[in-house]
Image (cartoon, coloured by chain):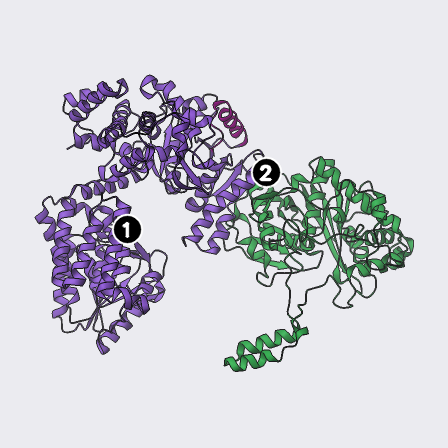
């Protein structure tokens, strides 16, 4: 498969700090977070808003009040009001999907410059009425008299008033994400210790990147607090002082007796947003930007959600590598989204195994994960995982680090609800 | 000249008013004559069943009477008959047997609204540019073409007085709610609605309007003679409290309204045109009209000779320093000029507070319904902060508002020059440091300029712009234009210590301190000056400004100008007691939650002063006012200001010098330089050499010259 003639440059990326949901960003909406990330990106790059052709953002649990998050972003005062904008949902790969959509539009020549990103506020999720209650409310709104209306409400029972909130679970099977990770740990023989070691590494590396300023560089401080006069400058989930002992002491959450998945080796519920500026190579050159990296290829795949839910990347990654015309050995840096340590290790195991190579119909295993080159600034377990925002967060960190280390090829791997996997290859030159 | 065009649309005459060569429609004598003749023709024309009156200007109905023309008239009799002629023209409208519909889009003010009120039916648009009002009292006049008669009859005394006495205007939707117009519609259907209304009026006659205001309040107050008496009494008391008795127009308007409602139409119109004539030749109105023209002329003055340079658009503003001043500049720039603002400070917590303060300015606009919630969201996204200079590469103008310290300001200038493009202008907001000193190490001195804002930035209308000898004309014009975009009245002044406003303020505040040190009670000093017409007295002003700030400025001025501007030692002693004024809750006055609660009697003991009324109010007034007049004359003749006009506007908008006195230089002209000089000499003998008249003022007096042409 030939590579497109028009290369797509990743010029810059910015994100808000990531915060445990219900903490500092409790009173903010995903749209506010997304607008802040995009605003800062536009200001820092100094791009003239009139040059942007399209805005695309990912979000997994949209607000009922502003369901098209991207349009809220595209109505920033820095941008003209006639830029089309839409929001995408490929679960945890939504941010990645937004970037790949931008890539498609630019390579097709439909757009030259696209603002992409994603956001999630798990502090601001819609709380729904029960089915019966919703029905009664709709009926009541159509009632013609007060008496009729009271009659309708009289039918309500106490349990109808109990609200329904969306669970982080698979709608097709009812299995929660954590349960899936637990299942994967057991079926793939991923032990508790390996999971905790990975979580520890994630925190240590994120803490180091926080201290040396690599993370801070990507962050747009966000006003928050009751009077919104406090600037949140850093991520609040990273624990520089955590130890293997602390992590091992945590109780498994999803299977108290035989389980190994804990709050410590899973990604937490997080609020945050991220944004990246993508453009055709020629445009970047004409505008005087020095791109961080170029998108070389991407791929998506899906597995039966009833099987091992988070194994999608096992299929997507080799596809993306093939499309890029490179092999795992060519990769200088790898970013694997850490939904759960059990999932990361399950994916890694499959990529390295002969048995899986056969299942994938490949002569050789996809590749062996080299942890010195993987998640070098920490991952979602330590930094957090605002679903829609993770893709652009990872792309930005990877591109920045590729520039710093002058690495030619980098890989992004993201697992997503619904059994999906997303992979993207970036190239430096 | 034809200002009107008429089209007959199947029996409905659509009259369009479009005054040639003018951006807005104005009522002149020529327009009045043409209109009267046109109306007579239409009344006689059998093919015409109804008349629609509309404007051909975009977003303007009628801005009011032509003030230029009206200032040509000099005698009371002439002006009275001008008012009477206006009334008569509108009697012809009101008496028309063929219904007349006013279709209003854009500003409908003064005579424009009076005309609309005389029509049988009014429709306005709900567009933000549409506003209806009677601003006459702002020029020291009253509505003289029946406005004081028709508006109260239409919407009730209290609502009408609310508009007339304050010279207010209201948006279209509000005008509909008040009952000023019969319908309020989107601009797209104004013409259609007017035709339909005209047809309806022809078919069914003019509708009966419900008595206003409706409900219990209407029954108890507006529609009841005893209630109305209460309304008049309250209105009079409010006016006197607000104007201090210095402005006769609101009281005259009140009389005209009362005469019309209580003693009948004929009497009302008579009082109205008589009062109009009296006011129009009066000194207060003359001064306010002069000020109106001066402000308009200033709006067209770019601070450099015309054609010298043109302004660069400012789209991105950088503000250095997120303190009270920086945040005020940021918030005002976003809300008034709608530019992107990047606020730079060294610490994030400070930036957080600064952004919050800037947001509060926007939220204030929302509370006062100047903007919608949607606009607030949009505007707030123009604000951001940074601890480095990220995002400064493409900034057009940087205004620094850091601590008043030469070394710090110079360091900031160097940093900014390093972080911005060669096109970026660097403006420094200082009240005491000469701009040329700050600009000394500049790589691009032609891009350095002073922009002296007054605090609080969002409220204070004046901006002093101070070029140095090396500032380019382009930089000056760009700064002036941007200042205006921020909603400020801009004067360009010379780079002299204290510039203009603080220069003339310094001797005045020093003198207030001395009067206090001599035992004059604080409230006496302040009362004398509020009676003179200042919005606040000098002692209260020191509290507002902050004693620390005043003291620092006082020292700088003393160093620059010597003994004449020696500060009284009162402020230093107050500061030693931790009294910095309103911001610390205590100064000369006592403050509770930022509100003045009265003179803090402890300050007398603190300074070992026994309060006593040694000086007469005349002496107090003379010492305070003449110290300012003397300094103003001196500074004006040193070339600190470009014209007396700039100086007087600066004093009125920057210090609150009573507008009806026209400003300090105008006042010298009015009193007479000779008399000012002799009074200053008397004060000098009695109270010290600081009152010695400026030598050039003495020369002026000897040559019998004035600041303004006669």
- Between disc 2 and disc 1, the foreground one is 1
Magenta stretch: helix, strand or loop mostly: helix
Q: Colour of chain B?
A: purple
Q: Colour of chain A?
A: green
Numbered label attached to residue B59: none
- The CA span between labels 2 and 1 is 46 Å
Task: Report x, y in % for residue A200.
Answer: 81, 44
Q: Secondary structure at mark 2?
A: helix
Residue occupied by mark 2 = B348
Q: Quick check: can you spot residue B152? A: yes
**Quadrant of the rendering where the N terminus of chain A is positioned:** bottom right
Q: Is residue B28 left or right of residue B586?
A: left
In the rendered structure, the residue with mark 1 lies on which chain?
A: B
B410 in the magenta segment: yes
Task: Report x, y in % for residue A223.
Answer: 58, 45
Indicate the quadrant where residue B544 lies: top left
Which segment is the magenta one? B400-419
Residue occupied by mark 1 = B238
């Amino acid at each position: 498969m030939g590579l497109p003639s028009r290369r797509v440059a990743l010029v810059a990326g910015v994100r808000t700090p990531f915060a445990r949901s219900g903490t500092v960003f409790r009173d903010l909406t995903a749209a506010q977070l997304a607008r802040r990330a995009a605003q800062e990106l536009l200001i820092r790059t100094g791009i003239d808003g009139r040059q942007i052709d399209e805005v695309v953002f990912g979000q997994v649990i949209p607000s009922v009040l502003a369901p098209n998050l991207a349009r809220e972003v595209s109505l920033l005062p820095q941008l003209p009001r006639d830029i089309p904008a839409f929001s995408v949902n490929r679960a945890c790969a939504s941010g990645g999907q937004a970037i790949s959509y931008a890539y498609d539009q630019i390579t097709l020549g439909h757009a030259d410059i696209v603002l992409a990103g994603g956001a999630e506020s798990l502090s601001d999720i819609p709380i729904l009425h029960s089915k019966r209650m919703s029905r009664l409310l709709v009926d009541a709104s159509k009632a013609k008299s007060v008496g009729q209306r009271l009659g309708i409400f009289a039918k309500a029972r106490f349990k109808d008033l109990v609200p329904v909130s969306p669970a982080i679970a698979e709608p097709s099977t009812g299995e929660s994400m954590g349960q899936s990770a637990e299942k994967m740990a057991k079926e793939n023989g991923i032990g508790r210790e390996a999971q905790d070691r990975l979580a520890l590494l994630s925190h240590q590396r994120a803490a180091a990147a926080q201290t040396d300023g690599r993370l801070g560089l990507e962050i747009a401080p966000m006003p928050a607090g009751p009077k919104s006069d406090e600037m949140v400058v850093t991520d609040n989930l990273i624990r520089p002082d955590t130890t293997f002992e602390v992590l091992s002491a945590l109780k498994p959450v999803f299977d108290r007796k035989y389980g190994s998945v804990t709050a410590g080796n899973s990604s937490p519920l997080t609020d945050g947003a991220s944004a990246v500026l993508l453009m055709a190579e020629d445009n970047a050159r004409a505008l005087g930007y020095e791109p961080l990296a170029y998108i070389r290829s991407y791929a998506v795949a899906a597995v039966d959600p009833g099987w091992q839910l988070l194994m999608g990347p096992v299929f997507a990654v080799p596809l993306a590598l093939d499309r890029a015309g490179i092999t795992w050995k060519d990769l200088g840096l790898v970013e694997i989204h850490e939904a759960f340590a059990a999932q990361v290790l399950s994916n890694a195991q499959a990529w390295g195994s002969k048995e899986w190579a056969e299942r994938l119909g490949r002569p050789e295993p996809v590749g062996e994960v080299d942890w010195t080159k993987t998640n070098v600034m920490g991952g979602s377990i330590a930094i957090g995982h605002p679903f829609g925002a993770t893709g652009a967060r990872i792309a930005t960190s990877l591109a920045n680090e590729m520039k710093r280390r002058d690495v030619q090829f980098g890989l992004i791997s993201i697992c997503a609800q619904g059994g999906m996997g997303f992979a993207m290859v970036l190239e430096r030159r | 000249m034809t200002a009107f065009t008429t089209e007959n649309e199947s029996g409905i005459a659509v009259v369009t008013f479009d005054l040639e060569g003018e951006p807005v429609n104005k009522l002149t004598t020529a327009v009045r004559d043409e209109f009267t003749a046109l109306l007579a023709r239409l009344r006689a024309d059998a093919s015409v069943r109804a008349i629609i009156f509309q404007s051909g200007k975009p977003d303007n109905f009628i801005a009011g009477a032509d003030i230029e023309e009206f200032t040509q008239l000099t005698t009371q009799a002439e002006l009275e008959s001008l008012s009477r002629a206006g009334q008569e023209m509108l009697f012809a409208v009101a008496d028309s047997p063929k219904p007349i519909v006013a279709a209003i889009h854009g500003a409908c003010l003064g005579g424009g609204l009076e005309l609309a009120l005389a029509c049988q039916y009014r429709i306005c648009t709900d567009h933000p540019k549409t506003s209806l009002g009677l601003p006459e009292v702002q020029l020291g006049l009253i509505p003289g073409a029946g406005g004081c008669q028709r508006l109260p009859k239409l919407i009730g005394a209290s609502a009408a007085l609310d508009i007339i006495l304050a010279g207010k205007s209201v948006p279209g939707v509000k005008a509909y709610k008040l009952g000023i117009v019969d319908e309020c519609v989107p601009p797209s259907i104004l013409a259609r609605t007017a035709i339909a209304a005209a047809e309806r009026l022809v078919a069914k006659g003019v509708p009966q309007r419900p008595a206003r205001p409706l409900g219990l309040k209407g029954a108890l107050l507006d529609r009841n003679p005893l209630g109305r008496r209460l309304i008049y009494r309250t209105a009079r008391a409010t006016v006197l409290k607000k104007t201090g008795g210095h402005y006769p127009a609101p009281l005259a308007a009140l009389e005209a309204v009362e005469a019309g409602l209580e003693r009948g139409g004929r009497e009302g119109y008579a009082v109205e045109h008589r009062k109009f004539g009296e006011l129009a030749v009066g000194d207060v109105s003359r001064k306010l009209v002069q000020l109106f023209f001066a402000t308009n002329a200033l709006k067209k003055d770019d601070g450099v000779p015309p054609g010298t340079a043109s302004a660069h658009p400012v789209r991105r503003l950088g503000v250095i320093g997120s303190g009270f001043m920086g945040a005020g500049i940021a918030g005002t720039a976003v809300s008034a000029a709608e530019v992107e603002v990047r606020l730079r400070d060294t610490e994030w917590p400070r930036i957080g507070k600064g952004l919050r303060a800037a947001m509060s300015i926007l939220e204030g606009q929302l509370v006062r319904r100047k903007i919608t919630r949607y606009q607030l969201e949009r505007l707030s996204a123009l604000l951001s902060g940074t601890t480095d200079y990220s995002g400064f590469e493409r900034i057009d103008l940087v205004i620094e508002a850091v601590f008043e310290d030469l070394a710090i300001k110079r360091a900031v200038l160097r940093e900014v020059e390093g972080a911005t493009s060669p096109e970026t202008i660097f403006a420094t907001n200082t009240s005491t440091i000469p701009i040329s000193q700050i600009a000394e190490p500049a790589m691009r001195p032609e891009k350095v300029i002073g922009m002296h804002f007054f605090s609080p930035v969002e409220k204070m209308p004046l901006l002093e712009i101070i070029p140095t000898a090396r500032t380019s004309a382009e930089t000056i014009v760009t700064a002036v234009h941007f200042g205006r975009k921020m909603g400020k009245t801009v004067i360009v002044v010379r780079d002299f210590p204290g510039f203009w406003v603080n220069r003339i303020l310094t001797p005045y505040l020093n003198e207030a301190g001395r009067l206090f040190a001599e035992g004059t009670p604080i409230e006496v000093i302040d009362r004398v000056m509020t009676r003179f017409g200042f919005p606040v007295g000098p002692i209260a002003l020191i509290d507002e400004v902050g004693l620390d700030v005043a003291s620092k400025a006082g020292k700088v001025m003393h160093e620059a100008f010597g003994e004449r501007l020696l500060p009284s030692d009162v402020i230093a002693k107050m500061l030693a007691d931790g009294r910095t004024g309103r911001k610390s809750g205590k100064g000369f006055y006592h403050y509770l939650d930022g509100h003045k609660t009265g003179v803090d009697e402890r300050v007398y003991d603190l300074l070992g002063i026994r309060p006593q009324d040694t000086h007469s109010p005349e002496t107090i007034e003379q010492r305070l006012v003449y110290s300012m007049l003397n300094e103003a004359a001196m500074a004006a003749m040193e070339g600190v200001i470009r014209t007396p006009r700039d100086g007087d506007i600066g004093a009125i908008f920057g210090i609150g010098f009573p507008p009806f006195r026209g400003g300090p230089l105008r006042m010298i002209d009015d009193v007479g330089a000779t008399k000012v000089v002799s009074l200053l000499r008397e004060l000098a003998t009695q109270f010290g050499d600081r009152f010695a008249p400026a030598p050039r003022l003495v020369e002026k007096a000897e040559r019998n010259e004035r600041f303004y042409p006669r």
